[in-house]
Image: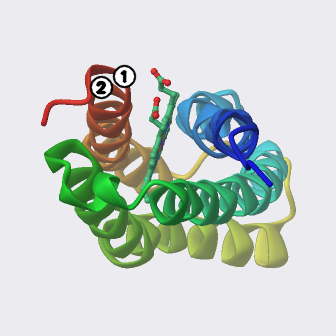
Amino acid sequence: MSISWLYPVLVGVHVTAAIVGVGPVFFFHPILTLAGNMGEAMHAHNIVERLNKAANIGFGALLLSGLSLGVTSPSLFQALWFDLSLVLFFISGIYVNTLYKAKMKQLQEIVKQSVESQGGDQELAQQYRVILKQKVPYEWVRILILLTIIVLMVWKPN
Ligand code: HEM
């Protein structure tokens, strides 16, 4: 029995997973900047946290469908773009779970402590504003790695 239908189906799953995984990442920082006081910042972090969980499911599906495409068509493992994408994908995972996560945790801690001790109505703490600004380049590194993978996916250099 021919399984020629399998490859395009997997590409469909893969592209859907790319939307679910990568899409939300572009909105994390803009959502956080909407907060006008500490209570709103808490709410913004909860939204980002929810979106991040959905994005992680997308990233898991991206890896699984990407590897399944490789199993269906093993010559892919010899293609530069495929191997480079895999490496970048893992680098991105390590980066997000170490440096990026540490910055996010710093912000979450300030918000939590501040709301617990003084309620949500007070204006954004100076330290919070500073760290939120410091987080911008971390956000760009994450986005640039993802964009590089997308370029590799579409361009497919051998
Ligand atoms: C952030 C991560 C990723 C994103 C956003 C992404 C996105 C995409 C997109 C949009 C396509 C369709 C491109 C086209 O057909 O022109 C694609 C194809 C593909 N991707 Fe990914 N991908 C990612 C990670 C991966 C990884 C880690 C692997 C390998 C394990 C992989 C393997 C593939 C394969 C084999 C194809 C099919 C290429 C073809 O035959 O046309 N992708 N990807």
Task: Characterize the local packing of mark 1: few (<14), some (14-19) or many (20 or more) Cα atoms within 10 angstroms.
Answer: few
Please give the residue where the numbered disc 1 appears in the rendered image: 154
Q: Is residue 42 left or right of residue 18?
A: right
The CA span between labels 1 and 2 is 5 Å
Of the 4 image quadrants, the one containing the N terminus is bottom right
Q: Is residue 141 left or right of residue 54?
A: left
Name the quadrant containing residue 143. Answer: top left
- In this rendering, the answer to whether 73 lies above or below 63 is above
Q: Nearer the viewer, residue 20 or 115?
A: 20
- In this rendering, the answer to whether 15 lies above or below 58 is above
Q: Residue at x 47, y 72 (%)?
A: 106
Q: Position of residue 41 (x, y in %)?
A: 72, 48
Please give the residue where the numbered disc 2 appears in the rendered image: 151
Q: How many marks?
A: 2
Point out the residue furthest to the top here: 155
- Which structural element holds mark 1? helix
Q: What kind of residue is marked 2?
A: Val
